[in-house]
Image: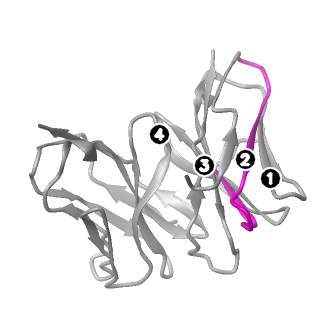
């Protein structure tokens, strides 16, 4: 158990809809990362937050957005969903932004299926 | 930009065979290198890591050495078991993780 929790575990929805994925980092970790794992794109970095502020953006679509709240949990919002958004979405956390090579601890993922 | 290339799978081996999964990287600076494993239906688990050149990471019989001169981080295990069947990802980290495509390993009894 990494200490990172993600809800829900599974999500099934229809095209055009909007969903919210939630992540709670390990106790004390200030950084949260979101990754997408899809069959055609593999694993890719979406976005990183540190102590409530956006720190880095990867291949995140404009239809997607994220935020990190004062209690450090994070939410990834996916809107106008398309079939191609079906994927496993992972959240990871790490303790300290200053060290660029801080180990990241992964949650179990949320499997999103868009029908 | 930074990138990771790992050998395509699936790799199919018999139990007790020797395993090598090749991984090479392109990066600026001095990233940390990782191998993660994903068992069927599960999330990502850190298998081993190395943070600087010539470091050797090891765990559960798996090893990988950070080779700066060849920009490689090949994963090896001397004797694989059926329970090692999984997808293995090589990754480099410079703040966020940059991933290889993953290599599916199938071990037959």
Q: Which residue lies under the disc numbered 2? A: A23
Specify the segment rendered in magenta: A15-34
Q: Tell me whether circle 1 and circle 2 mark residues in contact (CB < 8 Å).
A: yes
Q: Earlier in the sequence, mark 3 or mark 2?
A: 2
- Quadrant in the rendering for residue A19: top right
Query: How dense is the environment of label 2, judged by Cα within 10 Å: few (below 14), some, or many (20 and up)?
Result: many
Q: Are both tags, 3 and 2, on one chain?
A: yes
- Quadrant in the rendering for residue A54: bottom right
Q: Position of residue B52 (x, y in %)?
A: 42, 83
Q: Which residue lies under the disc numbered 1? A: A73
Q: Tell me whether circle 3 and circle 2 mark residues in contact (CB < 8 Å).
A: yes
Q: Are both tags, 2 and 4, on one chain?
A: no
Q: Is residue A25 magenta?
A: yes
- Kindly tell me whether residue B27 is visible in this rendering: no
Q: Position of residue B42 (x, y in %)?
A: 47, 39
- Quadrant in the rendering for residue B26: bottom left
User: Marks 1 and 2, how far apart in space?
Assistant: 6 Å
User: Marks 3 and 2, how far apart in space?
Assistant: 8 Å
Q: Residue at x 25, y 60 (%)?
A: B22
What quarter of the picture does the C terminus of chain B occupy?
A: top left
Chain under label 4?
B
Q: Tell me whether circle 1 and circle 4 mark residues in contact (CB < 8 Å).
A: no
The disc label shown at residue B42, or none? 4
User: Marks 1 and 4, how far apart in space?
Assistant: 22 Å
Q: Is residue A55 left or right of residue A106?
A: right
Q: Position of residue B45 (x, y in %)?
A: 46, 54
């Amino acid at each position: 158990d990494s200490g990172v929790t993600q809800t829900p575990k599974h999500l099934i929805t229809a095209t055009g809809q909007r969903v919210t994925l939630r992540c709670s980092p390990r106790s004390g970790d200030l950084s949260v990362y979101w990754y997408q794992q899809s069959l055609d794109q593999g694993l890719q970095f979406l976005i990183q937050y540190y102590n409530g502020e956006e720190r880095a953006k990867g291949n995140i679509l404009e239809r997607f957005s994220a935020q990190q709240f004062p209690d450090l949990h994070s939410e990834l919002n996916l809107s106008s969903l398309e079939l191609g958004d079906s994927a496993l979405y992972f959240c990871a956390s790490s303790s300290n932004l200053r060290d660029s090579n801080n180990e990241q601890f992964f949650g179990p993922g949320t499997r999103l299926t868009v029908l | 930009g930074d990138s990771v290339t790992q050998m395509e799978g699936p790799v199919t081996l018999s139990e007790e065979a020797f395993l090598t999964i090749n991984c090479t990287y392109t990066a600026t600076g001095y990233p940390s290198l990782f191998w993660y494993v994903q068992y069927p239906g599960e999330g990502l688990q850190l298998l081993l890591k190395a943070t600087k050149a010539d470091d050797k990471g090891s765990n559960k019989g798996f090893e990988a050495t950070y080779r700066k001169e060849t920009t490689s981080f090949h994963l090896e295990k001397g004797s694989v078991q059926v329970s090692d069947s999984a997808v293995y990802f090589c990754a480099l980290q410079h703040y966020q993780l940059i991933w290889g495509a993953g290599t599916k390993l199938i071990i037959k009894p």
